Amino acid sequence: MNKPSKVDGLLHELCVTHGHCGSNVVVTDLLPSGGMITSQHFAELMLQAEKMDEQTYGRQHQENLSLIELKFRQHLGVSCIKVSDLKPEKPPQ
């Protein structure tokens, strides 16, 4: 069995440990089709998938943004990455 990728590890920690699993939409559904994405933009998309807006959630929204940005940098080792590198790996068929 293959070791999970850094992206899979990030998504797993955010969902299982911190509860950021999305709703009827998940963060990977919201990623741009190409280009680069920053940890900040990724965090914003994650909370958008959670339907956690700043106006309703205030301080909790900001704390979660900071946490997601931190976890992005910890798992991926960078603050900006190609969107194509963020797509979860498909299992071999």
Image (cartoon, helix red, strand yellow):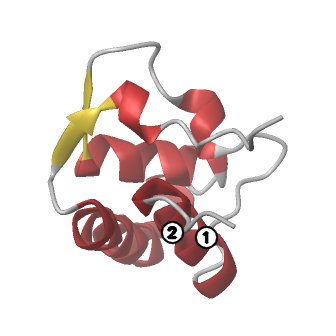
Give the structural element (helix, strand or loop) at label 2. helix
Task: Determine the image quadrant of residue 35.
Answer: top left
**Type of amino acid under label 1:** His
Q: Is residue 8 left or right of residue 29?
A: left
Q: Is residue 23 left or right of residue 7?
A: right
Q: Is residue 37 left or right of residue 25?
A: left
Between 89 and 31, the one nearer to me in the picture: 89
Percent x, y for residue 61? Answer: 44, 67
Q: Residues within 10 Å of mark 1 (few under 14, many from 20)?
A: some
Percent x, y for residue 48? Answer: 56, 44
Percent x, y for residue 17? Answer: 60, 86
Circles 1 and 2, Cβ within 8 Å, touching? The answer is yes
Residue lying at 55% horizontally and 65% vertically, measured from the top left: 4
Give the structural element (helix, strand or loop) at label 1. helix
* Location of residue 83 with respect to 4 vertically, above or below: above
Residue lying at 28% horizontally and 63% vertically, measured from the top left: 69
Between 28 and 85, the one nearer to me in the picture: 85
Residue lying at 43% horizontally and 40% vertically, measured from the top left: 86
**Which residue in the protein does label 2 denote?**
9
Res. 12 mark: 1
**Type of amino acid under label 2:** Gly
Q: In what quadrant of the picture does the C terminus appear?
A: top right
